[in-house]
Amino acid sequence: MITVMKFGGTSVGSPEALRRAAKIITDGKGSKVIVVSAMSGITNFLVKGADGSHEDRNGLIEEFERKHVDVACQLFEGKQLDEFMKDFGERMDKFRELFSDEAASKDPYYRDNIISQGERFSSLILGHVLRAAGVRSVALTSEDCGIYAEGRPLSGSADLQKTESVMNIKVKPYIDDGVIPVITGFYGIKNDGHPLTFGRGGSDYSAAVVANAMNADLLEIWTDVDGFMSADPRIVPDAIKIEEMNFGEAAELAYFGARVLHPRTIEPVRIKHIPLKVRNSFKPEEPGTIIHHLRKPRDDMLRSVAMKTDLSIIAISSAEIAFHPEMVARIIEKIADNEVVIYSISTSLSTVAFLVHSNDVKSIFAKLNTLDPGDIERIEVKNDMALVCAVGDNLLSKCGVSAEIFTAVKEARANVEMISEGASDVSLNFVVPMSRVTDVVRILHGKYAGGIR
Ligand code: ADP
Ligand code: ASP
Ligand code: MG
């Protein structure tokens, strides 16, 4: 039995957390492969450095070094510390080189390289913690493993087939030999060997990719909450833990904003029928949430609700556009040119409206401007929008459920700007102004979550 265990930033973010993670790993049964995030706060720190907003590079490098050495000094002493510092020094040399490499800084993927550095150090520390505990382990980077990725800077997708064949050669022998690999999350490498990150929070996806490649029996995502909950507990403090979900439900919620899982985590495990558990590294005794193919149907109206903010609606009007599907196709082609994600589409006789991330509006406009001016009468943009995604067993099958949901929206004094129902068989999505979205989520959750029918 192979279990892939992923530890998030807070779960490796301090000496205590690292010791707890090591205990969870050694307590687990069967073969294990570990995937780690950077220690909490480190990726944000590197993002600032990559943006050049950090006062000076040497200061950044020193602070980065100090943050890791502080943790190491609390974990290791004597020979263990010496061994760690030797490996650490080698990595630090490469880290320094990266910041002084003028040519590399011109590469469009340079930021991927900078912001993925934290994982190289957290994996090294956890590998040494395991070794200090007498466990055979090896810290491996995505380069060492052959986790291949393709796509635009900062939003890579894994090449699952290539990753599987290379990892079988480079990583499987360790597992067969009883050595625990501790692998960097968050990024893969392009065919030219350069790092490409999977988007913020991407270590969950890395872990799913590793589980897929190693044909694991189970993927465990160890984080700082008891499991997948009925809402983000930071927004809805009385959110409850969900015991069991199916892949479709979890995928929709993750895609539409439930940060507990990176939006793309489900697919690599779903296609290999690998169950996934979300567990709390601060409370290993809690069973967490199991996500798999089937689950017992329940009668809850609402199982979980997620929200995604910073969205914009782009409404494009043209006379009788509904009778000109070729024009709609041309517009979509322009938007697709930018590889942007379209969260929802809605049409009427003369308008087609797209829901996109606000960061993408500028580039979409530039592309739309290249359309024939005769094609488009007007383009309107509504910013500061948020999408609410409600998942539940009865959402689409039971008469009147939508009416009840929109009653809750009315109570939150929010205007519904866009609705998408029927596109998925498990969720109902709608758009409200960002200023009202937390109220909508709280009221909706308060009325209908957790067994209220
Ligand atoms: P990690 O660093 O372990 O990857 P993240 O911060 O990325 O952790 O994800 C865990 C956080 O996700 C929780 O602390 C919680 O605030 C947030 N979250 C959002 N939606 C949900 C949900 N439905 N269930 C549980 N946690 C959620
Ligand atoms: N360290 C990366 C981030 O903060 C990836 C992750 O934690 O999943 O986005
Ligand atoms: Mg995360």
Image (cartoon, helix red, strand yellow):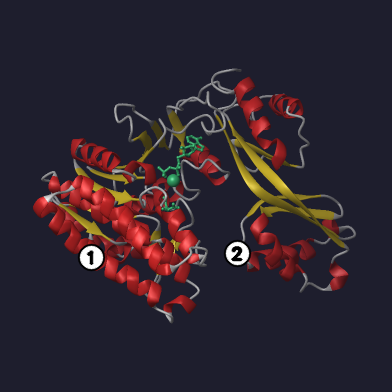
Image coordinates for residue 345, horizontal then vertical, percent: 71, 51
> Which residue is nearer to you in this view: 367 or 184?
184
**353 horizontally vs 16: left or right:** right
Image coordinates for residue 446, horizontal then vertical, percent: 61, 22
Residue type highlighted by circle 2: Glu
* Residue to which mark 1 is pinned: 89
Can you tell me whether the CB of the residue at mark 2 lies under 8 Å from the nearest atom of ligand 2? no
Image coordinates for residue 141, horizontal then vertical, percent: 29, 62
* Residue to which mark 2 is pinned: 339
Is residue 72 in view?
yes
> Given the current orientation, which residue lies at the most extreme top position?
452
> Which residue is nearer to you in this view: 39 or 451?
39
Label 2 with label 1: CB-CB less than 8 Å: no
Would you identify the image quadrant in which residue 290 lies?
top left
Q: Quadrant of the C terminus?
A: top right
Could you tell me which secondary element the residue under label 1 belongs to?
helix
Q: Residue at position x 27%, y 66% from top? A: 91
